Image: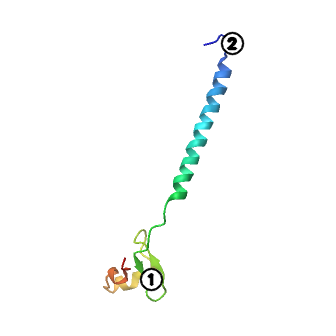
Amino acid sequence: MPQNVTYASLMEEINKLVQQVQSIQVNEVKKVIHTRRKPDAKYKDPVSGQTWTGRGKLPVWMKEPIAKGISKEMFALNS
């Protein structure tokens, strides 16, 4: 290592490299987020036409029929 390299110059160089790595990581995460495909619908309300993927909370339009004993498979889309 050359003698004229100071601690401050080394730290400055390290900070620049860290910022470059962080920038690359952020860009890679953005690529992953933007390339995700929206999941296909599995269920459809015949009255309103609203759909549900089967993920997350049960939709409002399906709660009443389920409470009455109707199977959610009655709303299934045939894929």
| Farthest-out residue, front | 79
How many numbered circles are shown? 2
Residue 49: image location, x then y, percent: 48, 84
Callout 1: SS: helix
Residue 16: quadrant of the picture: top right
What's under tag 1, amino acid-wise?
Answer: Trp
Residue picked out by circle 1: 61
Q: Determine crowd level at label 2: few under 14, some 14-19, many 20+ residues with C-alpha closer than 10 A.
A: few
Looking at the rendered image, the disc whose residue lies closer to the viewer, 2 or 1, is 2
Looking at the rendered image, the quarter that the C terminus falls into is bottom left
Residue 13: quadrant of the picture: top right
Is 62 situated left or right of 2 in this image?
Answer: left
Judging depth in this view, the residue of 72 and 40 nearest the camera is 40
Residue 26: image location, x then y, percent: 58, 46
Say if 26 sits above or below 48 in the image.
above
Residue 7: image location, x then y, percent: 65, 18
Residue 71: quadrant of the picture: bottom left
Say if 11 sits above or below 4 in the image.
below
Question: Looking at the image, which residue is at 58% across and 47% down?
Answer: 27
Say if 58 sits above or below 5 in the image.
below
Q: Determine crowd level at label 1: few under 14, some 14-19, many 20+ residues with C-alpha closer than 10 A.
A: some
Say if 54 sits above or below 62 in the image.
above
Callout 2: SS: loop
Question: Looking at the image, which residue is at 32% across and 80% down?
Answer: 73
Residue picked out by circle 2: 4
- For marks 2 and 1 on the same chain, the one whose residue lies earlier in the sequence: 2
